[in-house]
Amino acid sequence: MSENQHGFSPEVHKQAVFKAPIEKVWAAVATSDGIAAWFMPNTFEPVVGHEFILKAGPFGDSPCKVTELDPPTRLSFTWGKDWTLSFELKDLGGQTEFHLYHKGWDADKVTEFGQPHPVVQENMANGWTGLVAKLQGLVEQ
């Protein structure tokens, strides 16, 4: 996706190759316990149409809904009022190529908490870098 002069894009994308089998990575991104271990507590269930909560600490509970589920390669869900989060996995034979897409950013919108998207995006893009590293450490154990 193209970025404007401020580095703002409608999508945040993080990519990594994990030294772990795809089934182990899938369990970490597509189960409630797995997501809680590296991201945040939740009421996720791997069922299309399932509505669940991401417990975002001081920001409260964020409503989400599973929109796509194709084990063990793709999971998407809506997050809050504007965003979609997708995890895409590719089996590299004992290793897994991991992609995270955080879509729905709009320079003219604000979050449920009244923060402008461009401000939040920079913080969250940096946060995703740390979270993907945490996920990698977890699945490579």
Image: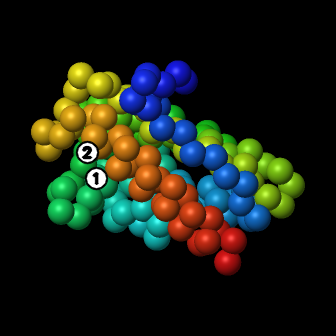
Quick one: label 2, few (<14), some, or many (20+) residues within 10 Å? some
Pinpoint residue 63: horizontal percent, then vertical percent. 25, 45
Does residue 13 appear to the left or right of 32 in the view shown? right
Q: Residue furthest right?
A: 93
* Label 1 element class: strand
Q: Residue at x 43, y 22 (%)?
A: 4
Determine the residue positioned at 34% across, 65% down: 41
Report the residue at 55% width, 58% height from top. Answer: 132
In the depicted view, which residue is nearer to us: 26 or 60? Answer: 60
For mark 2, what is the residue? 63
Sort mark 1 into few (<14), some (14-19) or many (20+) by Cα contacts within 10 Å.
Answer: some
Horizontal side of 64 relative to 134 (left or right) equals left
Image quarter of residue 27: bottom right
The spot of residue 13 in percent (x, y) is: 54, 39
- Compared to residue 114, the image places residue 42 above or below, namely below
Residue in the image at 48% along x and 38% along y: 12
From the image, which quarter does the C terminus lie in?
Answer: bottom right
Identify the amino acid type marked 1: Ile
- Residues at circles 1 and 2 in contact by the CB criterion of under 8 Å: yes
Name the mark on residue 53: 1
Any part of residue 50 in sight: no
Quadrant assignment, res 93: bottom right
Q: Where residue 17 is drawn, which disc sits there? A: none
The one nearer the camera, 65 or 58, is 58
Q: Secondary structure at mark 2?
A: strand
In this rendering, is residue 140 above or below 101?
Answer: below
Report the quarter where the N terminus lies. top right
Q: CA distance from mark 1 to mark 2?
A: 5 Å
Q: Choose the circle earlier in sequence order: 1 or 2.
A: 1
Count of numbered labels shown in the rendering: 2
Residue 105 percent coordinates (x, y): 36, 30
